[in-house]
Image (spheres, rainbow, N blue to C red):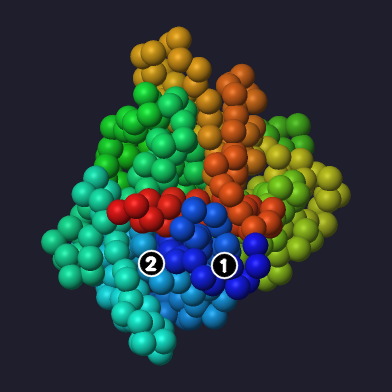
Amino acid sequence: MSEQATMSQPRIMGWDVGGAHLKAVLINAQGHVLDAKQVYCPLWRGLNELESAIDVILLEMQAESHAVTMTGELADIFPERHSGVLAIAKTMQRKLSAVNSTVNNEVQLKFFAGKKGFVAPDAVAQVTSDIASMNWLASMQYLAQKSQQAIFIDIGSTTTDIALLSDGKSHVLGFTDAARMQFDELVYTGVVRTPLMALAQKIPFAGQLVNVAAEHFATTADVYTLTGELAPEDNMADTADGADKNIASSARRIARMVGWDAHDAPLSAWIELAHAFKHAQLNLVRQAVLTKLSSQQNTEATLQLIGAGAGEFLTASVAQQLGVPYRSVSDFISAESGLIKNMAKVCFPAFAVASLGLSR
């Protein structure tokens, strides 16, 4: 599609404001992805991080309207979720309005409020509990238009969302973080930022079951750097020690988790340890998926796993272990290129909220 043809069509940008990343996906009126981008945004450092991340995205993408979902209200700079939602919403409105005013065009902005649909900026204060941490529901509402029976799994940098889709409708037990955590629909494990001490207290290493240090020495980004499964563009967060993200540094950090130094064993030993931590994380996700599978009453229906996020490769492994058919959300995305499609997959809630916003 030519740039001139693209610019002549109305476009909508979906935003997913997380606590560690800001994600944006630009689509045209046909739902075709024109661009997608993820920017590291450590919101716990202050709202200035969000402002800077918005600026970075707006340098590359412009749209006539915007749809926003978020989880960043959980950042500990906010005393509670209500004020977090308000602060993020006001920041988005101010930044987007400033850009649109330069082109003499009033910003068209709406926020995804879960089961209540989209709301205008002036209604946010009344529905903050419906806006908070609802990006997974935007994904589910989009997928419900595409699939009848599935378990959706979005493994990101920090958390994993798991939700059952049955008869073309989402069937979840929880709509708050507390309830979703209780029912294994929100699992605090991801492929970049999760401290390895959160995966297991003991881990197989050098032919023994050894204790894991209760220290923030290494993260899952080190694991998947060593296994070769984490794309560099998805590894944006700071390392545990603030040092490099290369293989040697990841080996040094993961060695500390079992009380060793990297030079105490060959690199192959640390790669093997990384696979042991991967197996521990797979167990966490698999157990949550099994909970959903056991709740599926219609045993005659063909159930598949649909994976999204930077950790989609883990979902594919879980599906293989369970003998369940697997599909990537990439199958439901039309994009300008394979590179853009892959980033839209990583930013799937942003893509979903933009797509939902087309008709609402």
Image quadrant where one finds the N terminus? bottom right
Give left or right: position of 260 versus 104.
right
* Residue 117 badge: none
Quick one: SS at disc 2? strand
Residue with the most extreme bottom position: 102
* Residue 66 badge: 2
Identity of the residue drawn at 39% across and 13% down = 298
Identified by mark 2, the residue type is His
Image quadrant where one finds the C terminus? bottom left
In the depicted view, which residue is nearer to us: 223 or 289?
289
Name the residue that disc number 1 marks.
6
Quick one: SS at disc 1? helix
Identity of the residue drawn at 70% across and 61% down = 232
Residue 167 in percent (x, y) is at 37, 24
Residue 92 in percent (x, y) is at 34, 74
Q: Is residue 271 visible?
A: yes
Residue 123 in percent (x, y) is at 17, 65
The total of numbered circles placed on residues is 2
Q: Compared with residue 176, is residue 77 higher up or lower down, i.e. above or below? A: below
Q: Compared with residue 317, is residue 17 higher up or lower down, i.e. above or below? A: below
Q: Counting other residues with Cα less than 10 Å from the Cα at mark 2, is it few (<14), some (14-19), or many (20 or more)?
A: many
Q: CA distance from mark 2 to mark 1?
A: 17 Å
Identity of the residue drawn at 45% across and 10% down = 300
Residue 135 in percent (x, y) is at 38, 51
Identified by mark 1, the residue type is Thr
- Dividing the picture into quarters, in which one does residue 44 lie? bottom left
